[in-house]
Image: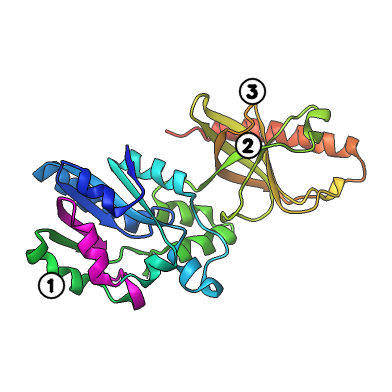
Amino acid sequence: MLTCRSLDELACLAEPLHLALGVFDGVHVGHQVVLRRAIDAAAEHGGLAGLVTFDPHPIQVIAPAKAPTSLLATLDHKADVVADLGIGLFVALRFDQAMAAMQAEDFLRKLTTGKVKTIAVGEDWRFGHDRGGDANFLLRNAETLGYRLEAVPPVMFEGDRISSTRIRQAIRDGNLDAAARMLGRPYSVCGNVVSGEKLGRQLGFPTANIDTGGLQLPPAGVWAVRCHHRRHGCLAGAANLGTRPSVEGGGLRLEVHLLDFSGDLYGEELDVEFVRRLREEIRFRNLDELKSAITADVENVRVLLAADKPA
């Protein structure tokens, strides 16, 4: 997938561009409808289907006090998801105070220095300084600037609009089935494997410690997980999400014991899909009790994931 970091780079692309615009946190089912309009336009008229998004989330710059404390996907995870959907161009614009101050007219003018033939947005999406640009603004300028507008209405789930905010709440509540239905895929978090205290290795259950900074996590406890790695494929795992009270572990962390795997994953990215929560995190009296519990957890995960293989 082709990637760009500025609007100026679009002018250098020779192909016609069919672009979906938005933040797309989580790339949920509603976002996917917007993306599909760009993908279908590229297939019908020729050219490149692209996504234009922002990093960091604009509200973190414009109104930090109102920003979500956790997001649904890292920028790299977002790129992986949209590539699988058929997006061939990923434009991640740095959102800073200068971008926040840019008028909608200036943003659209810079965007259309490229050969933009389609712009797809959610019909309620707004952009530019003081949210001055919207679907009506894009429609008024479409003929002059030579693009076709696709403004997509919200997608509903159980009577309410699907939104990233709603999905984050479902994950916090542990309702991962609802989250998966709104996302169009099981919920997972992507993070690099970082060094830990290696206690799991001492107990006979080495773990991959995942950097989950800034990502929305489900309730703490022991989870059956599936982990996806670029080289090793899909790996079954037993994960502990919590503060490790039995060993005075401190802050919240995600540690995954990968079943039937040996190898060094430090510094590499692991995509951890939460399948089912087995139990709450428990404070054990000693390491022998902890080891016995982990042994039972691993066997339970092995049975559960064997019976719950994806189709």
**Which secondary structure, mark 1?**
helix
Question: Mark 3 highlights which residue?
Answer: 261
Q: Position of residue 155 (x, y in %)?
A: 31, 63
> Is 190 on the left or on the right of 127, as rendered?
right
Q: Please state if 33 lies on the left or on the right of 168 as rendered.
A: left
Residue neighbourhood size for the residue with mark 1, other residues' Cα within 10 Å, grouped as few (<14), some (14–19), many (≥20)? few
Alpha carbon of mark 2 to alpha carbon of mark 1: how far?
A: 48 Å
105 drawn magenta:
yes
Q: Quadrant of the N terminus?
A: top left
Residue named by callout 2: 193
The quarter of the image holding the C terminus is: top left
Name the amino acid type tagged 3.
Phe
Front: mark 1 or 3: 1
Q: Is residue 270 above or below residue 113?
A: above
- Magenta-colored span: 103-130
The percent coordinates of residue 120 (x first, y second) are 22, 58
Residue 97 visible in the displayed image: yes
Where is residue 202? Give x, y as percent: 83, 29
The residue that label 1 is drawn on is 140
Q: Secondary structure at mark 2?
A: strand
Q: Is residue 146 above or below residue 132?
A: above
Q: Amino acid at mark 2?
A: Val
The residue depicted at 70 percent of the width and 48 percent of the height is 253
